[in-house]
Amino acid sequence: MKPLLQFLASITVFILAVSATAAEKGILAGAAEQEITPPEGIEIHAARPNVGVRDPLFLRALLLQDPTGTSVAIITADIICSGFSAMDELRERVKQKTGVDEVWFNCSHAHSSRWLRATPPADNRWTEEMIWDEFYEHPLRENPQEAAWNQKVHRAAVEVVAEAKKRLRPATLHAGRAPVQVGFNRRITDANGWTSMGVNRDAPAVPWVNVLAASDPKTKLPFAVLFEHPAHPVTVPPGNNLVSADFPGTAVSRIRQQLGDDVIAMYGQGCCGNINSFPLRTSFADADAAGNKLGEAVLAAMEKSVPIDAKEITLRSKHIKLPTRPLPSPEVIAEWKKQNENHPARMRQLNKMSTALQQGTTPPPRRFDVYGVMLGDQWCLVGMSYETFAEYELWIDQHAPFAHKMVFALTNGGRAYIGTDEALAMGPNGGYEAACLPNWVGHETMSPHLGPPAVGSEKEIHRTFESLWKRP
Ligand SMILES: [Zn+2]
């Protein structure tokens, strides 16, 4: 063989050898955690001064990396919520400091925890959208203790992913599901078509837990367990002023009791927008009962889980804007102004509507993001911003072409609710999560969007989910 051909042949052999080694290698996984319990004295959700800790809050990360180096850090945190400004900032910092390709941050939505906010901008000027996003009632600069905690959580996200990266090791992944339900649909529509909150056992809910476990290929022992089941963590009693992770915290403890304290167990919140845990706001004992039940279901799902042998991670994301419901006529707005003269906050919203009409503009749309991490056609995790209704999770389960599925809402930002088209079409009767004016109980009426999303948003969201796995 001529020297050039010999050289080319040796290169070919070398390339084949390298790709064979890469193909033989599988997924690497690493997991870590850090406690983020806020110190006594600083507020927890609903302006309650925290007087102590019932159970601690954690930030946890599972890092997955494929043989080509593609990596995703899945962070879960015992935090009630976090807006786009905080999430964009945090995710970018984690990517830059740790070199991972993608970072997902899921909030458990535990109601006895705190909001995570963006760090204050250099000029301390917060846009109205940032204030809304971060539920920003008191400037962080006025309370150094709150600012310090906020910074600590931002730092913890970087440190936990960096630690998970250090711990990367060959892993066998298993996916499973078991039946369980710790909550019920909370929307009840009466004979007059009016929707209020209660326990509706007949309306949609997600009756299972999805589990992904990472185990040592030799010992077969799990070292990380990610599980997801949608329900508002609102079982602990109201007005108790103790920090708590609610039922997800107990579920993690139950799993560790069985598998060992060194196993990183992580709870991801699913599409819980219309699901409350049951019973609502009663006792820590009830929260523990719900958490133990969920933990048992996770262990049962692991028992019958199946191995995922796909070796390639595919990451996708899509960002859209959801239009807001069209504005009413100037005459209708004028009438509402007469009724709300003594409500400055409402008058602000109504004046903004008048200005938009005069200028021929529409209310600002909502940013809506979806994310996908896929392992061949065997497993996918679909994540989305906002508190979406359980129907969205059920739709993904029915339509995503993967053997095993997991769904996260409250991921990477967004604030509050996105209902189904059916709920949005109810107009003022649509209840806390979906109602428009003149029902001021509708949560979204006070938003910078001046109302809930427009009817038609559900179909747009379904198309966006599909774009994660459908190629043109
Ligand atoms: Zn909520």
Image (cartoon, rainbow, N blue to C red):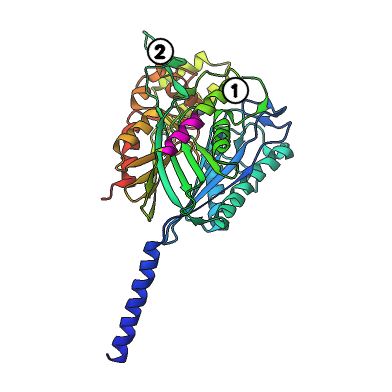
Q: Residues within 10 Å of mark 1 (few under 14, many from 20)?
A: many
Mark 1, ligand 1, within 8 Å: the answer is no
- Is residue 400 something one can see in this rendering? yes
Looking at the rendered structure, the secondary structure element under dot 2 is loop
Looking at the rendered structure, the secondary structure element under dot 1 is loop
Q: Is residue 14 magenta?
A: no
Nearest to viewer (mark 1 / mark 2): 1
Task: Compare marks 1 and 2 and give the one earlier in the sequence.
Answer: 2
Mark 1 touching mark 2, by CB under 8 A? no
Residue at the far front in the pictured view: 219
Position in image of residue 297 (x %, y %): 46, 31
Q: Nearer the viewer, residue 269 or 371?
A: 269
Q: Is residue 300 magenta?
A: yes
Q: Which residue is mark 1?
A: 236
The amino acid beneath tag 2 is Trp
Does residue 255 sit above or below 287 in this rendering? below
Please state, as top left, top right, bottom left or bottom right, where the N terminus lies in the image: bottom left
Residue at the far bottom in the pictured view: 2
Q: Which residue is mark 2?
A: 194
Region rendered in magenta:
294-303
Position in image of residue 270 (x %, y %): 45, 34
